Amino acid sequence: PYVIVCNHQASLDLLGMVEVIPDRCVPIAKKELMYMGTVGWACWLSGIIFIDRHKREDAIDVISQTARTLRRENVR
């Protein structure tokens, strides 16, 4: 497992990135995208992990837990 960091400029860019990233890469997006109607549903269904950028500790916890799961299970 590995992480690719992308600085996308629009919310819809994330959907395009999901199509081209390798299978074992985990997409992470800001939590605000989850509430954007169809875009939010598509992101959620495609397995994107949402983090709350306004709560630093919570975001770090989510990313740390995801990294531990990836390493332990060696899966997406």
Image (tube, rainbow, N blue to C red):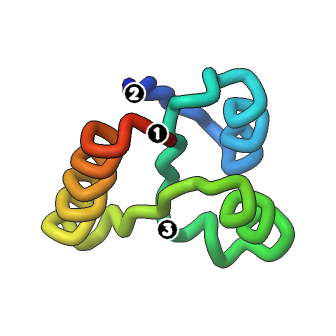
The image position of residue 32, as x and y in percent, is 55, 69
Q: Secondary structure at mark 3?
A: helix
Q: Residue furthest front?
A: 73
Which numbered disc, 3 or 2, marks the residue closer to the eye?
A: 2
**Foreground residue among 70 and 38:** 70
Contact (CB < 8 A) between labels 3 and 2?
A: no
Label 1: how many Cα within 10 Å (few below 14, some 14–19, many 20+): few
| Above or below: residue 74 compared with residue 33 | above
Q: Amino acid at mark 1?
A: Val
Query: N-terminal of the two: label 1 or label 3?
Result: 3
**What residue is drawn where x is 76% and y is 46%?**
12
Q: Name the residue rendered at 66%, 77% in the picture.
A: 35
Q: Residue 1 — which label?
A: 2
Classed neighbour count for the residue bearing mark 2: other residues with Cα under 10 Å, few (<14), some (14–19), many (≥20): some
Name the quadrant of the N terminus: top left
Mark 1 secondary-structure assignment: loop
Residue 4: which numbered mark, if any? none
Q: Position of residue 37 (x, y in %)?
A: 80, 75
Total numbered circles: 3
Q: Amino acid at mark 3?
A: Lys
Residue 68 in the image, given as x and y percentages of width and height: 22, 48
Q: CA distance from mark 1 to mark 2?
A: 7 Å
Residue at 22 percent across and 70 percent down: it is: 58
Residue corresponding to mark 1? 75
Disc ID at residue 31: 3
Residue count near mark 3 (Cα–Cα under 10 Å), binned few <14, some 14–19, many ≥20: some
